[in-house]
Image (tube, rainbow, N blue to C red):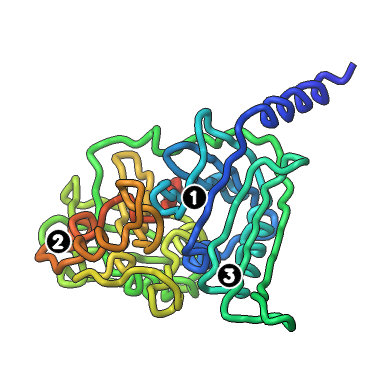
């Protein structure tokens, strides 16, 4: 008797008995660009969580020293039909991103429909774009695209932030400036030490390998800063920092509905936090247009009203200028490395 086979069959039967999930996303190009910015490897697996509150994607690198996630609240979707309980399954990350990229390139305006589960338990993607085209008989002509992505049974990965310990240190910095600093530290080829000094407030990053290089950032470069000790220093793998501090395209680069109408460009600010044990957390908050809004209807009017200039800075400006339900949150959590490593 094959116990594993029976358990898998029972799981598939339970999934089929649950009401199907139907989602409609208007800002497919924005989502695709966010995922493409992460430079996902071909072997990377992804855990998808569909819950009444929203959609989550979780993945980890091969070394298990870096965990990443993307959270999209239900309000970001034009329509959202997903009742309890939550659905958890695995997909090939690169396959999902490639499929989204094809759909995004086919149309910048047509909404993407997601259905789960399909007849064979797969994740189904559908895009219908009528546009202004007309067929030979004078009627509407459009493009209909489908994709079926195979899924697999997969448990939700452990959350490294469960081990987060206070007091924590953090700094806020423009994403472009942070990425430039990390790129400069590539050539030494070693791990990178991040050092925060309390008095005066200062941030530096240093790498040593075949050579050595140190990058200093002054208080003027920082939108926010807090050091739990007079001096806080931890080392991290360079590839983890490069992945975590990736460049998230802004509205002009995406060419789609990504909001940049705030006094401080929210998707240009990155929050980097270090806990008492050296755990590193990098958070990108990306404002996305479209969706239903907090009240369940269109967010256009509410969004325009909430985008007034603010005197606040950093993440405070992001949260004050935009409803948190309008933000896509990308988070990277990385383990520190020992000095001898």
- Which one is earlier in the sequence, the residue at label 1 or at label 2? 1
Rendered location of residue 68, percent (x, y): 49, 50
Residue at position x 21%, y 52% in the image = 231
**Camera-nearest label, 1 or 2:** 1
Residue holding disc 2: 201
Rendered location of residue 286, percent (x, y): 36, 61
Picture quadrant of residue 212: bottom left
Residue 235 visible in the shown view: no
Secondary structure, mark 3, is helix
Q: CA distance from mark 2 to mark 3?
A: 43 Å
Can you say whether 288 is above or below 157 in the image?
below
Residue holding disc 1: 68
Residue 195 visible in the shown view: yes
Can you say whether 215 is above or below 50 in the image?
below
Secondary structure, mark 2, is loop
- In the displayed structure, does residue 133 sit left or right of residue 13? left
């Amino acid at each position: 008797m094959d116990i594993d086979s029976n358990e898998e069959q029972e799981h598939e039967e339970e999934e089929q008995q649950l009401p199907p999930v139907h989602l409609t996303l208007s800002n497919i190009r924005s989502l695709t660009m966010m995922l493409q910015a992460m430079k996902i490897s071909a072997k990377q697996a992804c855990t998808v969580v569909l819950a009444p509150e929203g959609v989550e994607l979780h993945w980890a690198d091969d070394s298990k020293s870096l965990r990443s996630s993307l959270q999209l609240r239900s309000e970001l979707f034009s329509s959202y039909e997903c009742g309890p309980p939550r659905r958890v399954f695995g997909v090939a990350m690169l396959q999902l991103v490639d499929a989204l990229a094809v759909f995004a390139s086919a149309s910048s305006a047509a909404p993407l429909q997601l259905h789960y589960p399909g007849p064979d338990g797969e994740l189904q993607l559908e895009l219908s774009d009528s546009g202004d085209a007309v067929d030979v008989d004078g009627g509407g002509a459009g493009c209909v695209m489908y994709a079926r992505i195979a899924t697999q049974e997969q448990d939700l990965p452990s959350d490294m932030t469960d081990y987060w310990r206070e007091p924590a240190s953090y700094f806020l910095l423009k994403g472009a400036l942070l990425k430039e600093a990390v790129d400069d530290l590539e050539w030494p080829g070693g791990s990178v030490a991040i050092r925060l000094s309390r008095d005066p407030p200062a941030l530096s990053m240093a790498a040593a390998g075949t050579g050595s290089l140190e990058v200093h950032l002054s208080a003027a470069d920082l939108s926010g800063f807090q050091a739990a000790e007079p001096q806080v220093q931890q080392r991290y793998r360079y590839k983890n920092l490069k992945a975590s501090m990736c460049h998230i395209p802004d509205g002009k680069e995406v060419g789609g509905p990504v909001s940049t109408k705030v006094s401080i460009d929210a998707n240009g600010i990155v929050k980097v936090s270090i806990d008492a044990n050296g755990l590193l957390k990098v958070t990108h908050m990306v404002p996305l247009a479209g969706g239903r809004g907090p009240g369940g209807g269109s967010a256009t009017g509410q969004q325009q009203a909430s985008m007034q200039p603010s005197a606040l800075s950093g993440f405070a400006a992001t949260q004050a200028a935009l409803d948190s339900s309008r933000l896509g949150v990308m988070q990277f959590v990385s383990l520190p490395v020992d000095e001898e490593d």
